[in-house]
Amino acid sequence: MTTFSFENKVAVITGAGIGIGFEIARQLALAGASVVLNDIDGELARKAANKIQAKGGKCLAIEGDSSDLVVIHTLVHKAIHEFGHLDFAIANAGITTFGNFLEYEQTSFERLVAVNLQGSFFLAQVAARQMVKQNSGGRILFMSSVTGHQVHPNLAAYGMTKAALEMLAKSLGVELAPHKITVNAIAPGATITERTLQLDPEYQKTWEGLTPTGKVATTSDIAHAALFFLSPASGQITGQSLIVDGGWTAVSPPPE
Ligand SMILES: NC(=O)c1ccc[n+]([C@@H]2O[C@H](COP(=O)([O-])OP(=O)(O)OC[C@H]3O[C@@H](n4cnc5c(N)ncnc54)[C@H](O)[C@@H]3O)[C@@H](O)[C@H]2O)c1
């Protein structure tokens, strides 16, 4: 389902070889945008870009770790070099490391903060500098999580990074408003992806039982929210977080 046109728009998106990021990239490209698609796994990135190109979308794959400032600069540079300008930055890459707080290791903490926060913060900064230079506005989108709102077992560190991203969206929403750049976050609840199905083959069944709508989100459900935030229809919305969870946070039952 594509209801918006993104002709002549240029996007960069991190962590988009599979999962939520891939679906956002796919829907954006099929709606006319040119997409610079990043993944730390080069083969996944190339396969993803090929799939989008095969459907007629404009998409370029860039391999690299989204927490690395050199990679972030490369993504923005490629967007300008290949497509002329930059309109959207989607900081989607995020890792989920489960762990009991009392045993959580410093190395896990540092990696989590590097990918989830440093990568998102500096993608927003490098993209915003370009958007300010262009003087044509823009959209920045962070990928949060319901765990940034509600406690989830063994996700203290992850939930902390996601809550921080939502505060970052608020701060930047204000700071970049004079430049006509909106900054928002999406907080998905349980979403069926290659990773979540691999973590738990019963994932869909488990979360259907815990979600008020009786349905687990698909990557398409999350992409629809993203396309709304990137579209002209959301121009007056900034500094906000949209929970897409079928009502789960209203009651928040945890899995067994
Ligand atoms: N799937 C869910 O249920 C869910 C729920 C809430 C929030 N989220 C958030 O949504 C975003 C996407 O989640 P997902 O489940 O689709 O992702 P995922 O775990 O399936 O990963 C998607 C891609 O990101 C890539 N990646 C990982 N680290 C990277 C890095 N440092 N640099 C570049 N690429 C990297 C992986 O190689 C993978 O191809 C994440 O920020 C995640 O925290 C997901």
Image: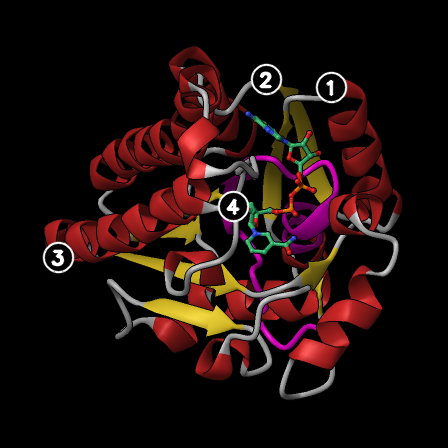
The stretch drawn in magenta includes residue 12: yes
User: As rendered, which of 243 and 58 lies closer to the eye?
Assistant: 243
Q: Earlier in the sequence, mark 2 or mark 1?
A: 1
- Could you give the CA–CA distance between mark 4 and mark 1, rounded to whole angstroms? 30 Å
Q: Quadrant of the N terminus?
A: bottom right
The crowding category of the residue bearing disc 4, from other C-alpha atoms within 10 Å (few below 14, some 14 to 19, many at least 20), is some
User: As rendered, which of 9 and 128 lies closer to the eye?
Assistant: 128
- Which residue shows up at 61% across the image and 44% down it? 34
The crowding category of the residue bearing disc 1, from other C-alpha atoms within 10 Å (few below 14, some 14 to 19, many at least 20), is some
Where does the image place residue 202, in percent across and percent down from the top left?
86, 60
For marks 4 and 1, give the one nearer the viewer.
4
Extent of the magenta region = 1-25
Where is mark 3, residue-wise?
174
- Could you give the CA–CA distance between mark 3 and mark 1, rounded to whole angstroms? 35 Å
Q: Quadrant of the C terminus?
A: bottom right
The crowding category of the residue bearing disc 2, from other C-alpha atoms within 10 Å (few below 14, some 14 to 19, many at least 20), is many
Where does the image place residue 53, in percent across and percent down from the top left?
81, 41
Q: Earlier in the sequence, mark 3 or mark 1?
A: 1
Q: Amino acid at mark 1?
A: Gly
Q: Amino acid at mark 4?
A: Asn
Q: Amino acid at mark 2?
A: Gly
Q: Earlier in the sequence, mark 3 or mark 2?
A: 2
Direction top: furthest residue: 70
Q: Earlier in the sequence, mark 4 or mark 3?
A: 4
Where is mark 4, residue-wise?
154
Visible residue check, residue 2: yes
Where does the image place residue 227, in percent across and percent down from the top left?
54, 65
Give the secondary structure at mark 1. helix
- Could you give the CA–CA distance between mark 4 and mark 3, rounded to whole angstroms? 33 Å
Give the secondary structure at mark 3. helix
Where is mark 2, residue-wise?
64
